[in-house]
Image (cartoon, helix red, strand yellow):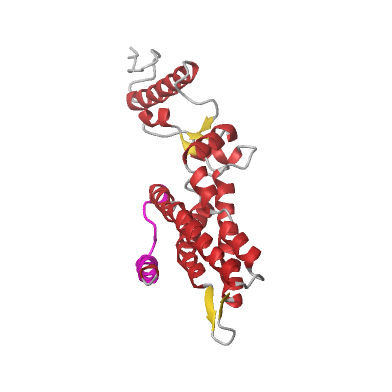
Amino acid sequence: MNKCGFSVEGYCSGPNNPSKSFKRGMRRGSERLKSIGRSLGFGVSTAVFPEDLRVYEKKIYDPQDKFLLRMNRLFVISCILAVAVDPLFFYLPLVDQEKNCIGIDRKLAITTTTVRTLVDAFYLLRMFLQFHTAYIAPSSRVFGRGELVIDPGQIAQRYLRRYFTADFLSVLPIPQIIVWKFLNTLTGIDVMTTKDALLFIVMLQLIPRFFRIFPLTSELKRAAGVFAETAWAGAAYYLLWYMLASHVSTY
């Protein structure tokens, strides 16, 4: 006499496979719930699991991709360097003892504007990658395994709504334009005007340039678990923060 084993779907699976039938039934049931949720509008239009992202025809990065994690660590360091470079603009005005007038330190102006431009240009790559980085759909977290939203439109809309404004304001080259405009105008009135404009613009941009570090580090810790993979890297990271605090406090 053949006995029918337990099965979620109602089929006979034999006396020795009730566990496999139960797991298979639960997995199929979960997939059906997800499809129902998407059809009701609770899901997303384009979402895949991380292992399926590799076969997607468009280049969308997994948040846990090794290349992206490595680049995010470099972006954090570049943000710290950007905050450290900005106070150098306050040292551009100088007093020419021979001519008894106020001028601009030409070498420091060229160095400061060049370094800031390079750092900001590197951060533009971060902004580009944000438009090509998938994120976990909030509606899929309840199933215990998040789906990645890979639709470029939804990714762009999410980034524009959250961090794009702060990133865009932080990379505007307004201090460089001011310095380049008045670099060859060494009269006292123009130099003082340049100094006042730099003081206002640099202090205003310092707010988004500083606070953009925190969502970047939190995103990195959420994807990788830790910022630094080794103790030496962590020590160097916190030493860089200490040097930044000491550097800025001198101004």
Query: Magenta region, mostly helix, strand or loop?
Result: helix
Residue 225 highlighted magenta (yes or no): yes
Q: Residue at x 52, y 66 (%)?
A: 195
Residue 84 on image: x %, y %:
45, 66
Residue 41 highlighted magenta (yes or no): no
Quadrant position of the N terminus in the picture: top left
Residue 21's quadrant in the figure? Answer: top left
Q: Is residue 209 above or below residue 242?
A: above
Depth check: 28 or 36 in front?
36
Q: Residue at x 49, y 70 (%)?
A: 88
Magenta-tinted stretch = 223-247
Q: Is residue 29 above or below residue 78?
A: above
Is residue 99 found left or right of 149 in the rendered image? right
Residue 188 on image: x %, y %:
58, 72
Q: Is residue 202 above or below residue 221?
A: below
Quadrant position of the C terminus in the picture: bottom left
Residue 179 on image: x %, y %:
60, 65
Q: Residue at x 48, y 53 (%)?
A: 69
Depth check: 9 or 179 in front?
179
